[in-house]
């Protein structure tokens, strides 16, 4: 037989590009677009909907960097679509998306006129299913964020756009498309068949019979169809692929638990304020996907991100809460944010869990047992003890696969900390937390999995991260097709908990890795943005002192404990320990904001310390020095206080003092609390 494999594979690619993809929509009509631009910070829907909008056609430029434009889109679903069986009506939007990575450019959120969020639109997720019937009216608002791409193709060269003061006012996007479209469901399904099969085919060895079998099936499919009537012959095409799609996986195929995922950096190449909107966009996509896919569950970490949703998008939060109760929206991680773990102190790392788990338990009645840090920049050997003490059972990351020199030899193991505590740990061998479930990714996961022979199960997190919008219906379609598909690993839509329980049962005695999980990458993160790092360090010390003296004042004099003020300060500090803020890897805007926040935290805590000291010491006119350290200094015992003496006076830069001068002071001189070794600079 002649070897025409290469020729046939080119024919398949051309058919997909020129015939199949263009046929996914049977028809489309443009909607009327009016626009209103926000001149400053984003505004809530209730304010945007009251503004006066002016006519705005597609093709026009919009959006200064970091600006927001609201598009009001209206129209009628064509009555002639009434007879079109096997279709769905959808809104298709192109805000001027580029080929840059999703999540690092424009994004939009679609609202109904009564303020209900439908779904987001992003570069790889541009459609919104609508319930409008033929002849019915469409009336929607799109909140479009003109977030600039500051990555320069991920070269990270210096940019003016990382700070609104220097980002300029030129409009950086051009509205390309706002249409109603009629999606042909059979053609869409066939398109997913092709995507999965061609992806698998290219991963199989050229000499393998299965590769040739898939190629012939795809060729037969194209032969069976009329290229000028793809919609009319899609059924014939799908029938031609049925047998090759039904071929089951090998008995020893690698088992993948596919877990819907979105890695939303709490700030990075955008400010915190934009992350709030990224969370709303992504979570609304997930809720929309859940309506269509009853077996789809979605884990998401970071209590802070749910707290933002609760504060800014209560209606969306209520829907998330209902899905958490149904076991489909799954809080994971148990931390306030996915923090850095090298620079925060042990107390702060513990507080990440205390604050995170408390939120999840109080809001949802759920305690996450998986520690979820896919992207933090290396992992302190103190963590296993803290994780286990917090009640967690499992740990997931994959960041160490970014190491420049030494590759970790395991994907599943017990990680042992400095005190001997061990925690069951998994690194997804797919080496990404933004998988699409492509043939290439699935094959890579199987190929790289290091526990072969001893175990055979790994986790693959799928979904576009940051502002990319999370999992898509195309990814779920890929998971369905690879549930059991000859030549492919098996893929099961799953949750972190189901994965870890299966992995632990399969591999009860995995290897033990003892000590730090150092990341051989991002090394400048220990030294860049020194003011942000100093702010964190100072805040941690002040928080301890404020809690100590507030507690002492409460016990000794019945003073009211300033719970809310301390919780607010902790939450700010915990947020800023996020793995792109404290390490100093964010844009200028983020670090300017971080420094302002640390200054506000220092002011608030200094005031709390002074108030507590006055409550403890009562009225009088002497000076008292409090020693927040553990050891006696200058005659004042550790964690105690007493009459100040000359030896207490320390000439150092200004710092919050626990010394209280009670007016009128008889000995007016500057004093400061004795400093512990952690205070030395
Ligand atoms: Zn990250």
Image: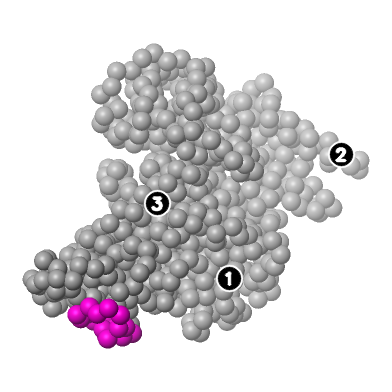
Q: Main secondary structure of the magenta part?
A: loop
**Which of 18 and 407 lies nearest the eye of the viewer?**
407
Identify the magenta region.
Answer: 631-647
Which mark is on residue 617? Answer: none
Residue depicted at 73% across the width and 30% down the height: 14
Question: Which residue in the structure is indicated by mark 3?
Answer: 595
Find out whether residue 627 is within the magenta segment: no
Question: Which quadrant of the figure contains the C terminus?
Answer: bottom left
| Visible residue check, residue 105 | no
Which secondary structure lies at badge 3? helix
Q: Residue at x 37, y 77 (%)?
A: 676
Q: Observer-nearest residue: 308 or 488?
A: 308
Q: CA distance from mark 2 to mark 3?
A: 64 Å
Residue pointed to by mark 1:
517
Q: Which residue is mark 2?
A: 4
Could you tell me if residue 575 is visible in this image? yes
Q: Position of residue 352 (x, y in %)?
A: 38, 65
Q: Quadrant of the N terminus?
A: top right
Residue 251: horizontal and vertical position, in percent? Answer: 66, 65
> Circle 1: is it few (<14), some (14-19), or many (20+) Cα within 10 Å?
some
- In this rendering, would 413 be left or right of 340? right
Residue 610 image offset from top left, x and y in percent:
20, 65
Whole-number angstrom distance, CA of label 1 to CA of label 3: 29 Å
Q: In the figure, residue 44 lies in which quadrant?
A: top left
């Amino acid at each position: 037989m002649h070897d025409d494999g290469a020729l046939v594979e080119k024919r398949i690619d051309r058919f997909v590009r020129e015939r199949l993809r263009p046929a996914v929509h049977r028809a489309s009509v443009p909607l009327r677009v009016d626009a209103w631009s926000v001149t400053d910070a984003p505004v809530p829907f209730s304010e945007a909907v009251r503004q006066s909008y002016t006519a705005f056609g597609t093709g026009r430029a919009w959006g200064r960097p970091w600006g927001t434009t609201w598009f009001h889109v209206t129209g009628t679903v064509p009555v002639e679509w009434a007879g079109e069986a096997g279709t769905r009506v959808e809104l298709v939007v192109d805000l001027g998306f580029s080929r840059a990575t999703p999540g690092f450019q424009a994004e939009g959120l679609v609202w109904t006129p009564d303020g209900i969020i439908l779904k987001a639109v992003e570069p790889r997720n541009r459609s919104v299913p609508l319930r409008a019937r033929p002849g019915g009216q469409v009336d929607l608002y799109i909140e479009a964020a003109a977030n600039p791409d500051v990555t320069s193709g991920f070269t990270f060269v210096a940019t003016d756009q990382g700070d609104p003061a220097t980002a300029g006012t030129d409009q950086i996007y051009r509205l390309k498309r706002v249409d109603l479209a009629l999606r042909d469901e059979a053609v869409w399904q066939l398109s997913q068949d092709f995507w999965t099969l061609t992806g698998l085919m290219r991963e199989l060895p050229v000499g393998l019979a299965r590769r040739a079998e898939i190629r012939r099936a795809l060729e037969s499919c194209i032969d069976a169809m009329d290229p000028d009537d793809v919609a009319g012959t899609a059924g014939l095409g799908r029938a031609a692929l049925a047998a090759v799609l039904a071929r089951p996986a090998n008995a020893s195929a690698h088992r993948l638990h596919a877990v819907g995922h979105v890695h939303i950096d709490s700030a990075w190449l955008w400010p915190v304020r934009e992350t709030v909107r990224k969370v709303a966009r992504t979570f609304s996509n997930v809720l929309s996907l859940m309506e269509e896919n009853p077996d789809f569950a979605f884990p998401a970490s970071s209590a802070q991100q749910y707290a933002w949703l609760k504060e800014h998008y209560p209606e969306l939060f209520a829907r998330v809460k209902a899905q958490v109760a149904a076991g489909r929206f799954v809080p994971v991680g148990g931390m306030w944010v996915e923090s850095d773990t090298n620079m925060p102190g042990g107390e702060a790392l513990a507080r990440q869990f205390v604050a995170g788990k408390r939120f999840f338990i109080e809001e949802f009645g759920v305690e996450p047992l998986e520690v979820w840090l896919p992207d933090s920049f290396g992992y302190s050997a103190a963590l296993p003890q803290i994780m286990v003490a917090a009640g967690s059972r499992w740990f997931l990351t994959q960041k160490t696969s970014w190491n420049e020199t030494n590759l970790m030899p395991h994907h599943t193991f017990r990680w042992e900390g400095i005190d001997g505590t061990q925690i069951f740990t998994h690194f997804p061998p797919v080496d990404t937390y933004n998988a699409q479930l492509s043939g290439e990714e699935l094959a890579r996961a199987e190929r790289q999995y290091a526990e072969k022979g001893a175990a055979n199960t790994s986790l693959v997190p799928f979904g576009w991260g940051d502002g990319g919008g999370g999992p898509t219906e195309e990814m779920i379609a890929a998971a369905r097709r690879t549930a059991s598909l000859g030549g492919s690993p098996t893929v099961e839509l799953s949750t972190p908990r189901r994965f870890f329980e299966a992995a632990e049962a399969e591999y009860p005695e995995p290897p033990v890795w003892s000590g730090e999980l150092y990341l051989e990458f991002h090394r400048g993160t220990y030294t860049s943005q020194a003011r942000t790092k100093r702010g964190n360090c100072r805040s941690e010390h002040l928080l301890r002192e404020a809690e100590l003296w507030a507690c002492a004042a409460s016990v000794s004099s019945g003073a009211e404990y300033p719970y809310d003020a301390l919780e607010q300060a902790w939450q700010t500090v915990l947020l800023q320990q996020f793995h792109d803020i404290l390490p100093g890897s964010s844009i200028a805007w983020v670090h300017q904001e971080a420094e302002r926040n640390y200054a506000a935290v220092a002011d608030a805590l200094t005031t709390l310390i002074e108030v507590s000291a006055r409550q403890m010491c009562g009225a009088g006119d002497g000076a008292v020095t409090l020693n927040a350290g553990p050891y006696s200094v200058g005659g004042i015992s550790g964690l105690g206080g007493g009459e100040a003496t000359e030896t207490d006076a320390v000439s150092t830069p200004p710092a919050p003092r626990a010394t209280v001068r009670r007016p009128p002071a008889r000995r007016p001189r500057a004093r400061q609390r004795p400093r512990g070794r952690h205070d030395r600079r």
